[in-house]
Image (spheres, grey):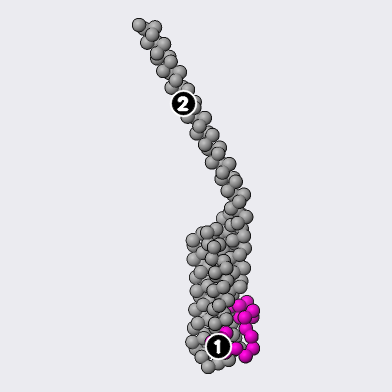
Amino acid sequence: MTTELVIVICFFLLMLGAVAISKQWITKSMNEQALEATKASRTIVMPLRLQAYERMALFLERIDPNQLVLRIHAPGLTVAEEQNLLMTAIRSEYEHNISQQIYISNETWKGITDAMDDVITIITSVAEQMDSFEGMTYAEAILTVSAQKPIIPRAMQILKADMQRFF
């Protein structure tokens, strides 16, 4: 009887060892697969993320009042016409780049949208003060007000700081 008990115990210990080795091998294999998936993801996602940072930097440059007014302004426009063109340009740029938010942090996206909102506020508030003026005076007033507020440089700093976490 004791010999049988010893055999059963040895068999049990042998099976327990086999299970432990199998579990360890499966865990190692799963970790290697996860590491490979992460590497593959990085090779796909990193270029997309870099492109998102580039596009958001371009977005900020394009909505910078200095660039926007120079690009949009045309002689002979009324304040309302120029305001409409400026707002349309901002909306168009935003709609073109909205999908980039999935590649950047929430804080950075908020910094970018806050900058856009601040530019819109300048455009709107200056227009409210200049109803009867010609568009050239309006454009100059926007440039004057925006020169006093570092809206775009502040947003660009947020964007660059976020990007530097990955590169």
Q: Quadrant of the C terminus?
A: bottom right
Seen in the picture, residue 47 relative to 95 is either above or below; the reply is above
- The magenta stretch spans which residues? 65-82
First along the sequence among labels 1 and 2: 2
81 inside magenta stretch: yes
Q: Quadrant of the N terminus?
A: top left
Q: Position of residue 31 (x, y in %)?
A: 53, 37
Which SS type dominates the magenta stretch?
helix
- Label drawn at residue 20: 2
Where residue 22 sits: x, y (%)? 49, 27
**Residue at 40% across, 10% down:** 6
Q: Position of residue 47 (x, y in %)?
A: 62, 55
Q: Residues within 10 Å of mark 2 (few under 14, many from 20)?
A: few
For disc 1, the marked residue is 79
Q: Amino acid at mark 2?
A: Ala
Query: In this rendering, is residue 52 above or below 68?
Result: above
Q: Amino acid at mark 1?
A: Val
Which image quadrant for residue 63? bottom right
Label 2 sits on a secondary structure element that is helix
Residue located at (43% from left, 22% from top): 16
Neighbours of disc 1 within 10 Å: few (<14), some (14-19), many (20+): many
Dot 1: element: helix
**Towards the viewer: 107 or 94:** 94
Q: Is residue 9 above or below residue 38?
A: above
In this rendered view, identify the residue nearer to me: 61 or 78. 78
